[in-house]
Structures are given as C-alpha cells and as structure tokens.
Image (cartoon, rainbow, N blue to C red):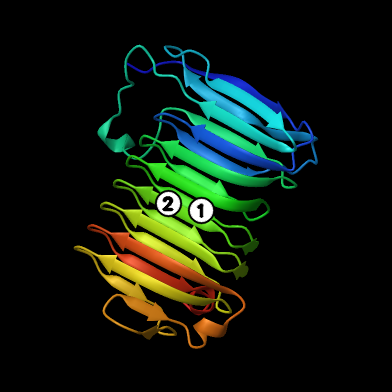
Amino acid sequence: MAKNVLTQPLSEPLGGAKTAKVHIDVGDGNLTIDSLTGGEPVLANGMLQYLESQELPIRSVDTSNGQATLTLKARRGKQSWLRLPWAACNGATTWQVHLNPDVIADINAHSNGGNIRLDLASLQVNRLAVDNGGGNIDVALPEHAANLDVMAKTGGGGVSIAIGSLASSNRIEAASGAGNVVIHLPGSLAARIHATSGMGKVIIDPCFSQIDKTTFQSPGYDHAANRVEITAKSGAGNVTVRTKVAENHI
C-alpha cells in the first residue's frame, strides 16, 4: 500500500561559514545536490520529503571559527515501504539540497538504494564520498578543482562521473558491484587510469596508451599541470572512460 509523502522545507543559516562538512543520509530515498542560484545568504536550502510513517528528518548545523557542520539524516519509518519490481533503483522520497557556492565543501552522501545525482559544477569541493546500497550515482564535478579526492561506489547501480576541464591533481575512485561505470574526461586533461571489470568489458578511449593489463595513461602525464588519477572498477558491468573530444564525434 502506498504511503503519503510529506515535504519539509530546508533553509540553514550561513553563520559566516567559509568551509563546511556536509553529511547527508537520505535513507531509502533519492538525493539531488547542486548549487544555490539566487545568491541567498544561507548555507543550504531545498526540500526534504519523508513518508507519513516517519518522523521529521534530523537536521543540525554547528558553526565554529568559520567552519560549519551540516547534518541531514532520514529517520526510519515504523515499517519499510514497498518497493515494486519496476521501481528498482529509485526511492519513495526525494531530497533536493542546494549548497552555497561560496563555501568550500567536504561532502558525504549516502542512500540505501535510491538514485543520487550531484551537480557540483558550480560549487567548491575539496572532498566527495558517495555511497549507495544499490541505486545509480551520477556526478558532475566542479569545473575548477585542485587536489580533489572523490570516492563513489554503489552495490548494484551504475556510476557516471564527469570531470571538470581544469582539474589539477585530482584523485577519482568509482566502483559498482554489478552496474556499469562511466568516466567522462575533458580531452585536454591528462589522466592515469586503473580500470578493471570482473565480468564486463573495459573500454578506454584510444588516446590513452596501455601501460600494463589494467593501466592506461596520457602521453606526458607525469609532467602535466592539469591531471587526474582514476581507479574505475565493476564486478559485472562495463568500465568505460571517454574523452569529451571523442564523444563530440560520435
């Protein structure tokens, strides 16, 4: 039996924060994170859905010495919602969180099985950890990012990561237990790629030279100013690394 979905508005004060640790656990639901666009003087706003059988989501913000810690966590209901076969990899509820682009963020995001979509292109991020029990993960990283560490893993869904054009010394790890893993790279960005799949194919853009069985690399990678190191793996799906130059010719 379907349950009514309720909505709680989200608006958290900036409090003079310059950096923020953001911890979001959406439970079984879907999650979208992107940038504020209206110049609002807040740390974050948006909306959080929850089922009528659940209590209100947990929300807290602590700010000290210019650093905020924002925590958003779904509460469990009295009983789990019924997930129909055709609704796999999709949650019963959706959270939309818009972060302040002037605040440097360290983001941790989790879902037990809903879809996670992170459009971080206009944000400042120095660390990203995304964990999903079984849903899909779709990430657009910041256009300008230096020394960014990214971990994105899911139990059974797909993982797609688009890397910004001016990445410098970024480290990306993407993994799926059974789904496809796809990395989109700017054609001008040097990369070293470690790619493996247990049962699927490994498909790497031919502009990268193969160093050994699982490693591929751009010419001049060791001396490139803008470069990224990628580890991509899947237990059963395909692992694909594409450059945007190649994609534009498809």
Near mark 2 (Cα within 10 A), the count class, few <14, some 14-19 or many ≥20, is: many
The residue carrying mark 1 is 139
The image position of residue 162, as x and y in percent, is 52, 62
Give coordinates of residue 66: x percent, y percent.
Answer: 75, 38
Tell me what residue is drawn at x 53 percent, y 20 percent. Answer: 58
In this view of the protein, which residue sits in the foreground, 161 or 194? 194
Q: Nearer the viewer, residue 230 or 179?
A: 230
In the rendered image, residue 193, in percent from the top left (x then y), is placed at 40, 73
Callout 1 crowding tier (Cα within 10 Å): few <14, some 14–19, many ≥20: many
Q: Which mark is residue 152?
A: 2
Counting from the top left corner in percent of width and height, residue 198 is at 20, 63
Quadrant in the picture for the N terminus: top left
The amino acid pointed to by label 1 is Val
Residue closest to the eye, 29 or 145: 145
The amino acid type of the residue labelled 2 equals Ala
- Specify whether 202 is left or right of 77: left
Alpha carbon distance from label 1 to label 2: 9 Å
**CB atoms of marks 1 and 2 within 8 Å:** yes
Q: Secondary structure at mark 2?
A: strand
> Against 240, is 86 above or below?
above
